Image: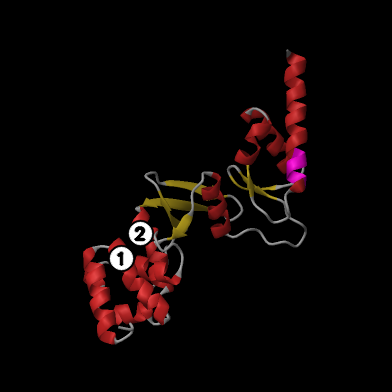
Amino acid sequence: MYRNSEANQVSTASNIRRFVKGVPYGQIFSTRECLHFGSRASVDQTFYRLVGDCKIVRLAYGLFVKLQPGMKMPSIEEIAIAKAKAFSKEIFVHGQDAAFEVGIADQPNKVPTYYVTGSACSSFRSLVHGRRVYLKSTAARKVYEKNTRVGKVLRGLWHIGEEALDLNVLQKATMNLNRDEIRQLRLAAYRVPYWLARFTNRSLTNFGQVLS
């Protein structure tokens, strides 16, 4: 029985090393992709040894990358994307960051924060950046337009709230959108709160930014 266990560990290590060898340099991969090779303990042990041998770099718990000399470490956003993907999720720009990007907020989030759909919030530590990253759950309708320019405008306006919304804010947020995107912004109104939909539709029409 001991020999079988030892053989299984060798097989697990061999399969994982073969898998890692086939991963392109710079591409993030996760422990979860290798769990079918053996027990969790054997998989973790193999990854621990690969890190110790400097074959791979641990980016966060369960996330790794192969780097060639001179290659840059993945960004926090790239690591967050990979972390979410490992659990079949997708990240989206947070409302505060969206508001900052479209020019209606003075600063982005002080700590890396992203939206994910679902009911559970979570966080992880980016070991290579020394920072904790937060994945905040939100309603699916808030990220309906994903990370497009229209999606960021809607999310930014929604985030700053009804009291802060006026014509000047709306003009700032939409100044870089083309006519198709303005039209898309109006069509997406049924996904946002009534106060936001009413204000954007009336105001954009008054500005003459939308074709009749």
- Measured from the top left, where is residue 42 in percent x and y? 68, 29
Q: Which residues are magenta?
A: 17-21
Q: Is residue 10 visible?
A: yes
Amino acid marked by disc 2: Lys
Residue shown at 68% from the left, 62% from the top? 72
- Kindly report the secondary structure that dominates the magenta region of the rendered protein: helix
Within-10-Å neighbours for mark 1: few <14, some 14–19, many 20+: many
Q: How many marks?
A: 2
Residue 19 position by quadrant: top right
- Measured from the top left, where is residue 95 in percent x and y? 37, 63
Q: Which residue is mark 1?
A: 158
Q: CA distance from mark 2 to mark 1?
A: 8 Å
Q: Foreground residue, 101 or 89? A: 89
Please say if 111 is above or below 197: above
Mark drawn on residue 142: 2
Mark 2 and mark 1 residues within 8 Å of each other at the beta carbon:
yes
Q: Foreground residue, 45 or 192? A: 192
Q: Foreground residue, 171 or 164? A: 171
Residue shown at 26% from the left, 69% from the top? 197
Q: Is residue 133 left or right of residue 38?
A: left
Among the two numbered marks 2 and 1 on one chain, the one whose residue lies closer to the N terminus: 2
Nearer mark to the viewer, of 2 and 1: 2
Q: Residue furthest bottom?
A: 208
Residue shown at 36% from the left, 76% from the top? 183
Label 2 element class: helix
Q: Which quarter shows the C terminus?
A: bottom left
Q: Is residue 169 left or right of residue 107?
A: left
Q: Foreground residue, 106 or 143? A: 143
